[in-house]
């Protein structure tokens, strides 16, 4: 055996398990479809109303189900089969995509029907997220979990590269084409999910009470390092998120079309995948927490550059740097949560984590859209990037244990 073969084997350790491979492919197709829909809906709504506030509403209506159902989605993931929940959610997403096909072919005169469909779509995603996230530790042994998380992140980021470009190209063929494509992909994803062998899962208690439903909150509050990691990402992306305003930058600032919007949406994923590939081969051996805090600062700086740039290549480069920096934060945060959380609590903790992520992403989109409507897209993004830099510095002081983390491993 050549000296480099053991390292190569460890790099693909998670794929030694067939269940994880099926799960990984299903998540990729799901995320790919979501990205296609996201680009198509953003361009379609902005083309219809030319109001950046409506772009913010796209994020808000998808986030609200996660917020309102936070005590339910995690408890369901801990009490019932996580694989089954994922499959049902894929089917609901499939019918949501079909509804968008129908509305588009019929002809849109108002964004309201699309928002209604997105609420249903967001509800499915609210249940899918904690179930899918907490299922991964049931499919691989603990020693392969960090590798599985890195590959999960790479799957998500790969989809964010290919999905937006595909969405822009498909929209150029016709407004309904991206939704039809997503329908087919959701169908394939649901089939893959139901072919995963039923894994062993420690079920949560059956008699639900406020104490059991709120266990995820109490666990996160008690584990200050986990709280710090989750809240750091939430506030940084909440302030520094620029995804919702990319149709504005593509159409009005950088003078690009739907395909150019796809490139802008894909650029963070390019940087993130490059970083994920590096992390699968070179996991943190020291200073993991310190690296995460620095990465959040870099994320904010790159966001500011993107907001101020009027040159397409510079904007794309800044977005790629944003994605690479965000990947470090995602990798550290997700590994900490999955390794430190007992399996019987993973669904509820993941549900809380998903709401934090939703607050940073979808609610961040609403923040960006609202600010852009008041002060313009460029100041909204640039000031948000500066705010993200400030968050990194403040969290380094508020959570000293976070910056002292060395290697990512279970703390006894």
Image (cartoon, rainbow, N blue to C red):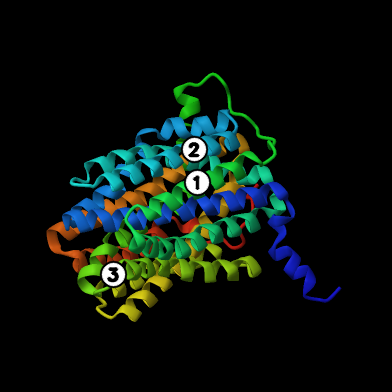
Q: Earlier in the sequence, mark 1 or mark 3?
A: 1
Helix, strand, or loop for circle 3?
Answer: loop
Q: Position of residue 142 (x, y in %)?
A: 69, 49
Neighbor class of circle 1 (other Cα within 10 Å; few <14, some 14-19, many 20+) is many
Is residue 169 in sight in this rendering? yes
Q: Which mark is residue 186?
A: 1
Side of 397 where 373 appears, left or right: left
Give the spatial CA distance, label 1 vs label 2. 7 Å
Which of the 4 image quadrants contains residue 148?
bottom right
Which of the 4 image quadrants contains residue 236?
bottom left
The residue drawn where x is 48% and y is 53% is 31
Q: Earlier in the sequence, mark 1 or mark 2?
A: 2
Disc 1, disc 2: CB below 8 Å? yes
The residue drawn where x is 17% and y is 54% is 49
Instruction: Work out whether 381 lies above or below 69.
Output: below
Q: Position of residue 5 (x, y in %)?
A: 79, 71
Instruction: Work out whether 176 lies above or below 75.
Output: below
The residue drawn where x is 30% and y is 58% is 239
Instruction: Look at mark 2 in the image and give the residue it sits on.
Output: 91
Instruction: Look at mark 3 in the image and give the residue it sits on.
Output: 257
Outermost left residue: 374
Q: Position of residue 343 (x, y in %)?
A: 62, 38
Helix, strand, or loop for circle 1?
Answer: helix
Q: Earlier in the sequence, mark 2 or mark 3?
A: 2
Outermost top residue: 207
Q: Position of residue 405 (x, y in %)?
A: 55, 60
Disc 1, disc 3: CB below 8 Å? no
């Amino acid at each position: 055996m050549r000296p480099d073969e053991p390292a190569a084997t460890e790099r693909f350790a998670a794929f030694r398990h067939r269940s994880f491979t099926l799960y990984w492919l299903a998540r990729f197709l799901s995320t790919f479809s979501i990205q296609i829909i996201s680009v198509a809906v953003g361009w379609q709504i902005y083309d219809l109303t030319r109001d950046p506030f409506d772009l913010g509403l796209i994020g808000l209506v998808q986030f609200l189900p996660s917020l309102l159902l936070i005590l339910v989605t995690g408890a369901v993931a801990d009490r019932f089969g996580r694989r089954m929940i994922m499959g049902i959610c894929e089917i609901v997403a499939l019918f949501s995509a079909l509804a968008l096909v129908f509305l588009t072919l019929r002809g849109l005169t108002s964004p309201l029907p699309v928002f209604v469909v997105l609420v249903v779509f967001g509800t499915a995603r609210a249940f899918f997220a904690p179930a899918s996230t907490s299922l991964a530790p049931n499919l691989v042994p603990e020693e392969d979990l960090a590798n599985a998380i890195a590959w999960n992140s790479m799957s998500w980021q790969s989809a964010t590269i290919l999905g937006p470009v595909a969405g822009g190209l498909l929209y150029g063929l016709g407004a309904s084409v991206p939704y039809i494509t997503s329908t087919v992909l959701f169908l394939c994803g649901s089939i893959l999910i139901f072919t995963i062998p039923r894994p062993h899962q420690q079920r949560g208690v059956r008699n639900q009470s406020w104490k059991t439903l709120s266990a995820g909150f109490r666990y996160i509050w008690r584990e200050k390092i986990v709280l710090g990691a989750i809240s750091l990402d939430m506030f940084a992306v909440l302030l520094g998120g620029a995804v919702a305003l990319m149709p504005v930058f593509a159409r009005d600032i950088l003078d690009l079309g739907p395909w150019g919007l796809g490139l802008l949406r894909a650029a963070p994923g390019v940087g993130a995948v490059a970083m994920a590939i590096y992390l699968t081969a070179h996991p943190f051996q020291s200073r993991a927490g310190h690296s995460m805090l620095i990465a959040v600062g870099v994320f904010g700086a790159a966001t500011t550059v993107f907001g101020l740039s009027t040159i397409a290549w510079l904007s794309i480069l800044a977005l790629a740097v944003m994605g690479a920096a965000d990947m470090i934060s995602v990798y550290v945060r997700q590994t900490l949560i999955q390794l430190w959380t007992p399996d019987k609590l993973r669904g509820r903790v993941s549900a809380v984590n998903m709401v934090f992520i939703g607050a940073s992403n979808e609610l961040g989109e609403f923040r960006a859209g609202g600010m852009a409507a008041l002060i313009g897209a460029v100041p909204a993004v640039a000031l948000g990037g500066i705010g993200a830099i400030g968050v990194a510095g403040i969290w380094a002081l508020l959570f000293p244990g976070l910056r002292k983390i060395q290697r990512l491993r279970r703390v006894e």
